[in-house]
Every structure is written in structure tokens, then in C-alpha cells.
Image: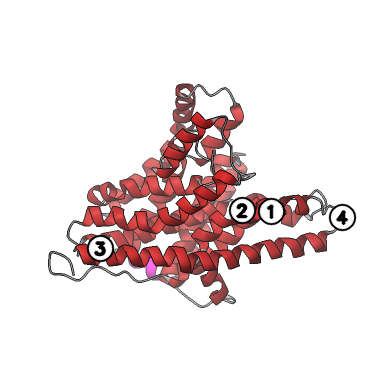
Amino acid sequence: MNLSGKPLAKTERFIGFDYLRGIAVILVFLSHIPVLDSMPYWFKRVSETGSCGVQLFFIISAFVLMHSTTKRFSLEHHRIKIYYFRRFMRIAPLYYFCLLYFTFFPSLFSQGWDNISSYSTALLLNILFLHDLSPIHINSIMPGWTIGVEMTFSLFLPIIIFYIKSIKSATVLFIGSIFFYLFLSNRYVYYLGQLFNLESYSVFRIYTNLWIGKNTLLFSSGILLYFIVNSNLTFFKNKSLFISSSSLAISVTLYILHILKFFNSKLLYLHYTFIFFFLVLGVYLFPRKLVAQKILCTLGKCCFSMYLIQFAVFEIFHTDLTAMTDHLFLYYSTAFGIFFLTFLLSYFSFNMIEKKFIKLGEHLINKLS
């Protein structure tokens, strides 16, 4: 119970989103696996596009956070404080544990640091979840840029909920984020690079692809989805009409990009955003059982742990994988073993760290309320 006399809000878990997260974590895993020249073309393409799994994560995250937070805000007293505390207990314990691990065992996927002063700054920014705001610290200690981006979004979510209250305002936000991404994002990062005296183009390019401004497009997509599914628009609830119209929209977008030869990384990113937008909407509106759904749902529940732990496991076996140039069967077997080991460690982490601290957080909220 809270101070208003109402029970604390409990939100349902969207099973369909769990198996989408399971698919996304597999894609992200494939994007980090070393690709050999002798590998078939289809595998190289899957590995290259695997990073788009992060886009799917962010869209789902924005939708689910918008849904759960809005519902809880209507029931809980001191809702802002409870919201931030709940988010901290959800993310911080495991993240801080991994932060400590990667301090002593640096990852191949991190940028590293030059001296103690640089490390101290990076550590402080990571503890405060502000590392995504610095081009030189976003992946300095551990490859946790996605966590920084998500926590920055979480920081502003109460403000978004306060101002974005209809499908109309959500649409304006979505269109505005597209405009910012296409025309202003790189310019802002350029000025930010001057502020940090960035001399390395590679650091600038990496940050351009990772920072919160680019991913605002994905979060605004999830917010728009939330208002769509809570609206009375019958257009989106007719299955045949939805499938045909979404397929047409995706096909037309792809055709226009091809004709105009604008198939660069920016517009391809926008195209994937549209695909995942309709995919998430379709899974929510028309849920159905899939083959291996139970496996994918289990992966989806452990996705936060899997994202962080995979880098530690890769660190151990990376050299072995790159040496298997002429033994593709052995390569695939080892890659599967790495994935399975990552899952086992993540399953343990999910149950012994994530769930324990989430439960502790809820217990403290109930006790203090």
C-alpha cells in the first residue's frame, strides 16, 4: 500500500516482447562474434546487421517503460522518487558488478583509458550513468553504452509523460526525432567533439553511431506505439489491414531508398526503425505462439545479463575463434558453446542478482510507503 491508500502498481509482463528480446539478444551476439573471410556470405550479412538488435531493444524498452510508468504514476504516491529508485535497483546492481569486473579484466570491445585520472573520470561517469554523454568515455571501461543511453532516456521519461499525453503529441515527437536524426544529430556531435578536443575521427564516428541523440528516434517510436495501442484507432486492430498496410509501407520505403540511392547507414537505420515499429506493434496487437517460444522468452528475460556478460565470455574465447579460419564446423560449435555459456551465466545472474535486487527494491518501496 502507498500513502494514498491504493495498492502499489503491478504491471503485466508482455510475453510477446520477451521472445522479441530473445531474438534481439541473438542478433546482438552475432554482431560481436569475429567474422572470418572463409565464412559464407549469408553469415557475414547476418553478423553485420546484428547490431540492429539494439534498435529493437530500445523500441520495446520505451514502450514497456511508458506503459508501466504511466500505470504506476496513476496509483503511487511520491511517484517520481519511487520511479527513479525502481529504475536504479533494476539496472545498477548488475551494472556495477560488471563495472568492477571489467576494471580488472578490460574488454576488447571497450575503448580503455590512458591514466588514473582518465579512469577516475570514466568510473564516476559510469557510476552516475552519464558515460553516454562523453565521446571519450562512452565505452571506456566496459562496452555499456546502451545502458547509459537507456538510463538517460529513463531520466527524462517523467518529463515526457508529463508533456506527451496524446497520439498527436507523440506523433509530433516522433517526426521531430526523425528530423533531428537526419539533419542535426551529426552537427551536434561535431560541436561536441570540438568541446572535447577530439582529434580522432574514429572516436567521432563511433560516438555518432551510439549517442542518445541518434537513439531518440527509437525511444520516440516506442512512445508513439504506446499511444497507438491505447487509442481507439480501429485501423490498427484489423489484422489483415494491418499486415497489408505495414508491408506496403516498409516496401515503399525500401523502394524509395533504393531509387534515390540513399541507402546509406543513416537511412538504413531509419528503415530498420520502421520495420521494428510495425513488428512490435504486430506482436502486441496479434500475439501468437511461435516455434521455440519458450526458449526465446527465457533468453528475453535474461537479455540484460546476456548483453553485459557476453563481453567477458568473448574475452576468453576470442583468440580461439579467430584462429579457426579453416575449420568452420569447429568455429560454429565454439560459437554456440560461447553463446550457451553466456546464457548459463546470465541465467544465474538474472535469478541471483537482477531478481533479488528487484525484489529488494519492491520490498523497500512497500516498507517506506
Q: Which mark is residue 326?
A: 4
Q: Where residue 352 sits: x, y (%)? A: 47, 67
The answer to whether mark 1 and mark 4 are in CB contact below 8 A is: no
Front residue of this view, candidates 317 and 104: 104
Kindly report which numbered mark, 4 or 3, lies closer to the viewer in this rendering.
3
Rounded to the nearest angstrom, the CA distance separating label 1 from label 2 is: 7 Å
Residue type of the residue flagged with mark 3: Ile
Front residue of this view, candidates 144 and 13: 144
The residue at the point 58 percent across, 37 percent down is 112
- Which region shows up in magenta? 234-238
Rounded to the nearest angstrom, the CA distance separating label 3 from label 2 is: 33 Å
Secondary structure of the residue carrying numbered label 1: helix
Tell me which numbered mark, 1 or 4, is placed earlier along the sequence: 1
The answer to whether mark 1 and mark 2 are in CB contact below 8 A is: yes
Please name the residue that numbered disc 3 is placed on: 365
Please name the residue that numbered disc 1 is placed on: 316
Rounded to the nearest angstrom, the CA distance separating label 1 from label 4 is: 21 Å
Tell me which numbered mark, 3 or 1, is placed earlier along the sequence: 1
The local crowd at label 2, few if under 14, some if 14 to 19, many if 20 or more residues have their Cα within 10 Å, is: some
Q: Where residue 279 sits: x, y (%)? A: 49, 62
Residue type of the residue flagged with mark 4: Asp
Tell me which numbered mark, 4 or 3, is placed earlier along the sequence: 4
Secondary structure of the residue carrying numbered label 4: loop
Q: Where residue 275 sits: x, y (%)? A: 52, 56
Tell me which numbered mark, 3 or 2, is placed earlier along the sequence: 2
The local crowd at label 3, few if under 14, some if 14 to 19, many if 20 or more residues have their Cα within 10 Å, is: some
Residue 251 appears in the rendering: no
The residue at the point 57 percent across, 22 percent down is 199
Residue 367 appears in the rendering: yes
Rounded to the nearest angstrom, the CA distance separating label 4 from label 3 is: 56 Å
Please name the residue that numbered disc 2 is placed on: 312
